[in-house]
Amino acid sequence: MSDPVLESLITTRVEHEIIECDPDLADTVSFCEHYGYRIEESANAILVAGKNEPKKYAVCLALASTRIDVNKTVKKKLEVRKVSFASPEEAIEVTSQTLGGITPFGLPSDLPLWVDSRVLECEKIIVGGGSRDRKIYLPPEGLLKLPNTEIVEGLAAPRP
């Protein structure tokens, strides 16, 4: 069986390290605490969905220390009146990845990937691995090799 995430990493020749992890510790805070990574270098990929029909989707990648600006930036970029985080079922169906492990790698080619500009300020980031049993550690510039990537200023803001 093919693995779109690993195929994407190979095809794009992104420098990376696969970090195996306990699926029960895949959530960002638990993972960072247990494996010794910093929240400030951890980035979460979250599927957002416009409420209009036909539905529009995008994956937003932002540092775990920030919060995605769904009500302004995302809504404006999706060009919809209402937007929300996709349901778990939608996230699995649209990305073909496991909830809690969604990654920028191996996404459908027509699905936009919006990366908050703060992500590129990190030396390295850790992102989901497409499933809950692995993460991917890489220089953030590697994201620029993905065909559907757009760097977005103000996609996320620091958490209060």
Image (tube, grey):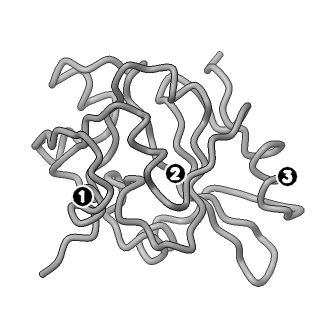
In the figure, is residue 29 to the left or right of 6? Answer: right
At horizontal 61% and vertical 30% (from top left) the residue drawn is 117
Query: In which quarter of the view is residue 78 placed?
Result: bottom right
In the figure, is residue 14 to the left or right of 52? Answer: left
At horizontal 44% and vertical 45% (from top left) the residue drawn is 143
Instruction: Residue 141 in the image: state x and y as whole percent.
Output: 43, 35
Q: CA distance from mark 2 to mark 3?
A: 17 Å
Instruction: Residue 115 in the image: state x and y as whole percent.
Output: 57, 42
The residue singled out by tag 3 in the image is: 76
Q: CA distance from mark 1 to mark 2?
A: 14 Å
The quarter of the rendered structure image containing the C terminus is: top right
**Mark found first going from the N terminus, 2 or 3:** 2
**SS label for mark 1:** loop
Amino acid at dot 3: Lys
The residue singled out by tag 1 in the image is: 131
Amino acid at dot 1: Ser
**SS label for mark 2:** strand
**SS label for mark 3:** helix
In the figure, is residue 39 to the left or right of 52? Answer: left
At horizontal 56% and vertical 68% (from top left) the residue drawn is 111
The residue singled out by tag 2 in the image is: 46
